[in-house]
Amino acid sequence: MGTVVRNGLGPMITDRLERPLGSLRVSVTDRCNLRCRYCMPEQDYVWLPKQSILTFEEIARLVGIFTALGVEKVRLTGGEPLLRHDLPTLTRMLAGNPRIRDLALTTNGLLLAKQAEALKQAGLGRVTVSLDTLRPERMRELARSDKHSDVLDGIAAACAAGFRLKLNTVVMRGVNDDELVSLIEFGHRHRAEVRFIEYMDVGGATGWSAEQVFSQREILARLSAHFGTITAVTERVDSSAPAERFRLPDGTTFGIVASTTAPFCRSCDRSRLTADGTWFLCLYAERGIELREPLRNGATDAELSDLIAATWRGRTDRGAEQRLGMANRTPLFQVEGLRADPHREMHTRGG
Ligand code: SAM
C-alpha cells in the first residue's frame, strides 16, 4: 500500500491490497425514469435532498482532486444521468481535464437521441447503454416503461454521432435469458459490444434470489450451443475491467460481468461518488465517506486530497467476494433499510 510514481504520470495511490485508485463513477442524480425490477422495484423512494446535490463546479473540483491522485477513468452515471439538466456542460468541464484518459457515460438511452450529438461535441468519449430486452412488451414488464423505441432511437443517435458503444444487459433467469443470442446479433449490427451482467444482490435489488441468477457458465453454455466454440480474449495484464471478454467463431466479441458468481474484487480499482458527494469504496459498502461537508465548509484541495488518499490507502473492501462466501444469500438490504438511508440504493451509488 502507498504511493508509487508512474513513468511520466502522476502518483498512483494504492490500497491495502495494492489496488490503485484508478476509476471513478460519478453519479449526477439519484433520479431515474425507469423502474427496473432488479434496481428500483418499489412504488416510491426517498430521494436525496435537492440542496445536497453537488453543483457541476463542485463535481469538477472533486474529480480534479481524484485525477491528481491517479484516477484516469471517469464514468458519469446515476440514477439516469441524462435527467440531470445540461449534462453536456459538465461533460465539457470534465473533458477539459487532461488527466482523464477515458470519459464515459452509462445511460438507459431514453433521452439519448436528443443529447448524443451535444455530448459528443462536449468531449464525451464512450457511451454504454443499458438494454435488457429487444421486446417492447417485456420492457413494459421489466422496467415499467413503454418507451422501448426511444432507447433504440438513442442507440441509433449515439452510433450516428460516432460513439463507440457498449450495451449492458442484466440477465435474469426466466425473464430475459432467452434473448442472449438476439442481443449479440443486435449488438453486432450496431457495432456495439454486449456485456451480460449477472443479477447482483446490491442495494435496491430487494427481490433478488440466487435462483434468478443466470451465471457466466450458463451464459457461455447458451451462446456456444448456438454459435459454436467460444474463446476467451486475453486482456492486458494490468486490466482492471470488470468484464471478462470472449470471442465467437465469427470474431464477434462480448463481455460477461460475473460479479455474483466470480467476483473481481482483487483487481477492483473503482470507487463511486454519489450526487450528494458521498464517496463509496465498494458497491457493497455499508457506508460512504462524506466529501460534501468538507468541500462546502472551506476545505482546501490539499486537505480534500489528503482525506481521499488516506482513506484509499486504508481500503480493504472485497464486498462481492464476501457475499459469495455467504451460506444463505438473501438481498443485501430490505426496503426499510433502504428507506432509512437511500445511500444504500444502487441508483444512488451509481452502477
Ligand atoms: N440509468 C443508467 C443505466 O440504466 O444504465 C445508469 C445507472 S444503472 C444503476 C447502471 C447499471 O447498473 C446498469 O447497467 C444496470 O443494469 C446495473 N444494475 C442495476 N441494478 C443491478 C443489479 N441488481 N444487478 C446487476 N446490475 C445492476
Image (tube, rainbow, N blue to C red):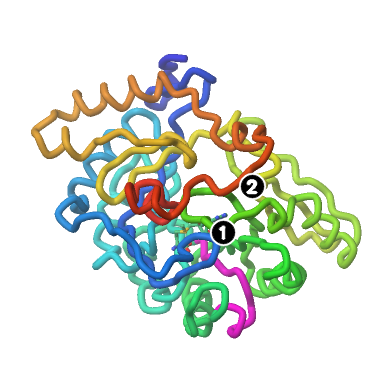
Mark 2 belongs to which amino acid? Ala
Residue annotated with mark 1: 207
| Vertical arrangement, residue 19 with respect to residue 136, above or below | above
Q: Nearer the viewer, residue 241 or 198?
A: 198
Is 237 included in the stretch rendered in magenta?
no
Residue annotated with mark 2: 243
Mark 1 belongs to which amino acid? Gly
| Vertical arrangement, residue 46 with respect to residue 157, above or below | above
> Are the residues tagged 2 and 1 within 8 Å (C-beta)?
no
Q: Residue at x 77, y 57 (%)?
A: 219
**Where in the figure is residue 105, as x and y percent of width and height?**
43, 58
Q: Residue at x 72, y 63 (%)?
A: 173
| Vertical arrangement, residue 247 with respect to residue 321, above or below | below
> Left or right: where does residue 99 sit relative to residue 292?
right
**Where in the figure is residue 90, as x and y percent of width and height?**
26, 57
Question: Which region is colored magenta?
Answer: 128-139
Q: CA distance from mark 2 to mark 1?
A: 24 Å
Q: Nearer the viewer, residue 128 or 225?
A: 225
**Callout 2: 10 Å neighbours few (<14), some, many (20+)?**
some
**Where in the figure is residue 248, as x and y percent of width and height?**
81, 59
> Left or right: where does residue 329 sit relative to residue 332?
right
**Callout 1: 10 Å neighbours few (<14), some, many (20+)?**
some
Query: Which of the two discs, 2 and 1, labels the residue nearer the N terminus?
Result: 1
Secondary element under disc 1, as helix, strand or loop, is loop
